[in-house]
Amino acid sequence: MEPKFRIGQTVYKAGTTNKATTMLCPVCAGNQKVLLVLGNGDEVAIDCDYCSRESADMPLGYIRGPYEISPDVRELWIHGIKMTLRAVQYTEGTDNAYSTYDEDELFGTYEEALEACAKLVAFRQKKDEEELARKFKIDKSYSWNVGHAMQQLVNLERQKIYYEKKIEILGKHVRGKK
């Protein structure tokens, strides 16, 4: 078995990463300020507390959104080769702190690695979709699992109604209408 790469060669590792996304703050709409109406009708602009939770000091105008699966190509420099009867592995790093990679994880060009990344992203997205299709409880029937999902939606709807009322009531207090 002949190694595909040699010591000292630059190669590219295909992978995926979870990329954090952001979205506009739903309270200040990205303005970093909210308008407080006092009891006498005066208006005061104050820092948004909702999006300042992320930074602790000042509002950012945005909050964390859902994570996205994105491609991750890393450039590596081969320091060593391990050959067995079944496989070839490559190492990167020093003798006491190195990483080992299988030959099928590495590519000779960035473009090849990026193409492999696209397949890995699609694979992870498919796995996420399969996870959605799995039962909550494997030992229960599909009808039980559907009922459980429906009950969760009912609970979320109750929470939505509760928080909408809470916003309405708290909004009256902010406007000084107690």
Image (spheres, helix red, strand yellow):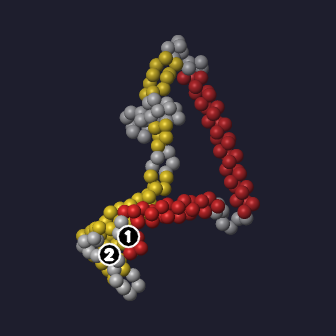
Regarding residue 98, the answer to whether it shows in the image is: no
Q: Amino acid at mark 2?
A: Phe
Query: Residue 13: percent from the left, percent from the top?
Result: 38, 66
Q: Nearer the viewer, residue 82 or 167?
A: 82
Give the residue at x 53% y 35%.
Answer: 26
Give the residue at x 67% y 42%.
Answer: 157
Query: Residue 124: percent from the left, percent from the top?
Result: 52, 62
Query: Residue 109: percent from the left, percent from the top?
Result: 36, 66
Separation of residues labelled 2 and 1 (CA atoms):
9 Å
Where 133 sits versus 178, above or below?
below
Q: Quadrant of the N terminus?
A: bottom left
| Callout 2 touching callout 1 (CB < 8 Å) | yes
Give the residue at x 64% y 61%.
Answer: 133
Q: Is disc 1 placed on a helix, strand or loop?
A: strand
Q: Amino acid at mark 1?
A: Leu
Name the mark on residue 5: 2
Q: Quadrant of the C terminus?
A: top right
